[in-house]
Image: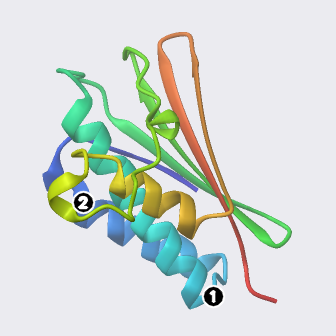
Amino acid sequence: MEQRFPISSDSLNDVFTFLNRTLTAESADPAASYAIELAVEELFTNIVKYSRGARTDVAIDVERHGDQLIVTLIEEDVEPFDATHWAEPDTSKPLDERNVGGLGIHLVKQMVDELHYRYEGRRGITTIMKRLEQ
């Protein structure tokens, strides 16, 4: 299932409605649903924050392949922005000694099984994969 959303924080409620409906239709377990919803919220919010004036919608596609859910976020006509390569935050440091940023992507990496980014033809394509509980 795929749906498109305007690049705006105002779209988050519609994104969650779409995800809830789609994950229910795909019989996703609660743990996988939670992880996917959290990951998509972080990724979509990053797109909103760093889109640098992009005027096209973001497509979100959810597919089930066997025991995996694959969620893809596609941005059109954008400059590359690969959040998957941000340096891992040093969570052992006190908060006042840490660099700003990166915690959301770090959390996404912990919650999903795979996180990938590719850039082709002015399209930013971020894909997450999450295995369903057996």
Q: Is residue 128 left or right of residue 68?
A: left
Q: Residue furthest right?
A: 66
Answer above or below: position of 74 versus 121.
below
Residue at image coords 47%, 29%: 82
On the image, the x and y values in percent for residue 51 come to: 25, 28
Q: Is residue 81 left or right of residue 61?
A: left
On the image, the x and y values in percent for residue 11 come to: 21, 54
**For the residue marked with disc 1, what is the amino acid?**
Asp
On the image, the x and y values in percent for residue 48 come to: 23, 40
Q: CA distance from mark 1 to mark 2?
A: 22 Å
Residue at image coords 51%, 39%: 84
Between 98 and 38, the residue placed more toward the observer is 98
Between 16 and 126, the residue placed more toward the observer is 126
**For the residue marked with disc 2, what is the amino acid?**
Leu
Question: For the residue labelled by badge 2, is the local secondary structure a helix, a strand or a loop?
Answer: helix
Q: Are marks 1 and 2 in contact (CB under 8 Å)?
A: no
- Near mark 1 (Cα within 10 A), the count class, few <14, some 14-19 or many ≥20, is some
Q: Is residue 21 left or right of residue 28?
A: left
Where does label 1 land, which residue? 29
Between 21 and 101, the residue placed more toward the observer is 101
Q: Could you say which quadrant of the image residue 57 lies in?
A: top left
Please count the marks in the image. 2
Q: Could you say which quadrant of the image residue 111 lies in?
A: bottom right
Question: For the residue labelled by badge 1, is the local secondary structure a helix, a strand or a loop?
Answer: loop
Question: The N terminus lies in which quarter of the figure?
Answer: bottom right
- Near mark 2 (Cα within 10 A), the count class, few <14, some 14-19 or many ≥20, is some
Answer above or below: position of 97 versus 84.
below
Question: The C terminus lies in which quarter of the figure?
Answer: bottom right
- The first of marks 1 and 2 along the sequence is 2
On the image, the x and y values in percent for residue 95 come to: 20, 63
Where does label 2 land, which residue? 12
Residue at image coords 30%, 43%: 46
